Image (spheres, rainbow, N blue to C red):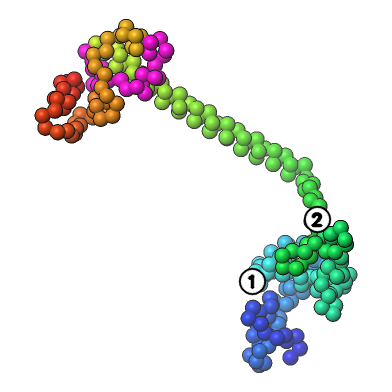
Amino acid sequence: MEGYIKATPRLKWGYELAPDAEGMARPIPEDMAVLNEVVEGILGKKLSLQEGIDIIKARVGKPLSREGLRKIVAERDTSVPQLKDNKKDWEINPDNYERNEDGSFVLRTNGIPVRKKRPKSGHNFHSAVKAKQAVRRSVANKKKEVERLQTRLENQKAALNKKKEVAQRLDAADGVANKQPAVITEEQLVSLPPTAQAAINNGDTPVAFRPHPGPQTDFLASSEKDVLYGGAAGGKDKSFYRLLST
């Protein structure tokens, strides 16, 4: 039973339950052959961890995490001191961990020492890659600029249409222009030039009727042919508004 290990609820990568030994797991020859090839390539500086992971996934069909492969490589790397006698990494490599002023390790809440952060190293991209990245950034920025301009254009079009509508209503001699009601709301009034607003507010432009804000204004400003307007019997509002809208 060479190569057999004790089975655990989560089997080690490259192993399967041994049918001839209860509670044991045996290596899968095909998987281990690919794994050994990848590990040798990584130790020989011919493959990176990511390239090794891609090869294993393509040839075996079973994924292996980056950390899992790193541990397997570390176990077989004779140039790296191995953990012996159940020693922890901070006992073997204490300079890799943060320390307090008194020399003791900086501990996490679970009691494990805090490892020092590795300095960030900038990526030294090839000039061709940098050129492509610059082009992509330029295209993305130009796309955003076009979207902003399109939004501004749509807003200006909407404002122009509102002013045209108000102008048509003001120019209607009989109170109706292009089958639109001759009612100007406060919101539309604000959109007029200051001179036009002053003329209406000062009485230079005749205003026959000012409805109260709310249902009265909504009723008269409606462009629909049929409008339902509720109210108690005997009131004058409904009949009065009907005469105004005809």
Depth order, front residue of 55/109 = 109
Q: How many C-alpha atoms fall within 10 Å of the one at disc 1: few (<14), some, or many (≥20)?
A: few
Depth order, front residue of 160/97 = 97
Residue 142 shown left or right of residue 14 in the figure: left
Q: Which residues are magenta?
A: 174-198
Residue 17's image quarter? bottom right
Residue 151: image location, x then y, percent = 49, 30
Q: Judge whether 186 appears above or below 197 on screen.
A: below
Quadrant of the snapshot with the N terminus? bottom right
Q: Amino acid at mark 1?
A: Lys
Can residue 242 be seen here?
A: no
Residue 197: image location, x then y, percent = 38, 13
Nearer to us of marks 1 and 2 is: 2
Residue at the image point whose x is 16% and y is 22% from the top: 240
Chain-order first, disc 1 or disc 2:
1
Residue at the image point whose x is 33% and y is 18% from the top: 166
Residue at the image point whose x is 48% and y is 26% from the top: 153
Quadrant of the snapshot with the C terminus? top left
Depth order, front residue of 236/24 = 236
Residue 34: image location, x then y, percent = 73, 73
- How far apart are labels 1 and 2 at the CA level? 31 Å
Q: Write down the residue under mark 2.
A: 118
Q: Main secondary structure of the magenta part?
A: loop
Depth order, front residue of 4/234 = 234
What number is the disc on residue 62?
1
Residue 178 falls within the magenta-colored stretch: yes
Residue at the image point whose x is 82% and y is 78% from the top: 86
